[in-house]
Amino acid sequence: MNIIVDDLSGTQIAGFLQEHVQEMRSITPLESKHALDLEALRAPDVTFWSVMDGGSVVGCGAIKRLDAAHAELKSMRTTPRRKRSGIASLLLEHVLTEAKRMGFARLSLETGSAEFFLPARKLYERFGFTYCEPFADYKPDPNSVFMTRSL
C-alpha cells in the first residue's frame, strides 16, 4: 500500500468520496452531516491523502487547517470491503506524523455518536484522542462527538 497526497482530480477518488458522502447521509441527519464534498476538499487549507493498493483507492483522509497550531481531521474512510484490515491505522499514523511536520500542535475531529461510528471512535482513542467540547464552528449536537489530541 502507498499513501499519496491527492489533488482530487481523478475519477476514482471522486467516486470513492461520493460513496462516503452518500453513506454519511444515510446514517446521519442532514443537519448533522459534516463530511466535506469534493470541492470543499480542494480548498487550499486542506491536505488530502489517498491510500492506494495497486491501482485502487482503499482509504482516504485529510486535514483542514483551522489556525497556525490547530488542524481538523476530515474524510477518514476505508473502503467497506477492507475495513478492519489496518488501513485506517496506517493512514492515521501517517496523518499524525504529517500534521506534526506541518507545524500543528493539535489535531481535532468530529465524528458521529451512532453505533456505526464506534469502531472509528475506538481507533481514535487508541491513537490518543480524548473527548472534548465542540471546536471551531461546531455547535453541540447529539449526533456528533468531538475529540482532540496534542501532537
Image: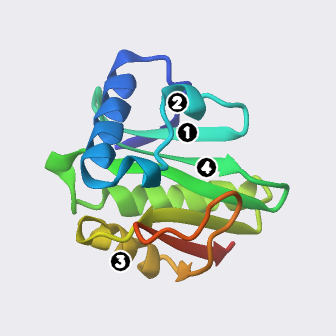
- Name the residue beneath numbered marker 1: 48
Label 1 to label 3: alpha-carbon separation: 23 Å
Q: Which of the two labelled residues, at mark 2 and mark 4, occupies the earlier sequence position?
A: 2
Distance between the Cα atoms at labels 2 and 4? 12 Å
Q: Nearer the viewer, residue 2 or 39?
A: 39
Residue 83, given in percent of the width and then of the height, sits at 21, 56
First in sequence: mark 2 vs mark 1: 2
Q: Amino acid at mark 3?
A: Lys
Residue type, label 4: Ile
Query: Decide: marks 2, 1 in contact (CB < 8 A)?
Result: yes
Q: Give how far apart the Cα atoms at labels 3 and 2 are.
A: 27 Å
Give the side of residue 49 with respect to residue 116, left or right: right
Of marks 3 and 2, which one's residue comes earlier in the chain?
2
Number of other residues with Cα within 10 Å of mark 3, as a class: few under 14, some 14 to 19, many 20 or more:
few
Where residue 145 sits: x, y (%)?
47, 72
Farthest right residue?
68
The location of residue 143, given as percent across then percent down, is 40, 66
Residue 122: mark: 3
Residue at 28% from the left image edge and 35% from the top image edge: 19
Q: Badge 2 is on which residue?
A: 6
Q: Which is nearer the eye, 70 or 24?
A: 24
- Vertical arrangement, residue 40 with respect to residue 3, above or below: above
Question: Mark 4 = which residue?
Answer: 63
Residue beneath the point at 54% across and 82% down: 131
The answer to whether residue 108 is above or below residue 71 is below
Sequence-wise first label, 4 or 1: 1
Quadrant that contains the N terminus: top left
Amino acid type assigned to the residue bearing label 2 in the image: Asp
Label 4, label 1: how many angstroms apart (C-alpha)? Answer: 7 Å
Q: Which kind of residue does numbered mark 1 sit on?
A: Phe
User: Residue 23 versus residue 65: which sits nearer the camera?
Assistant: 23
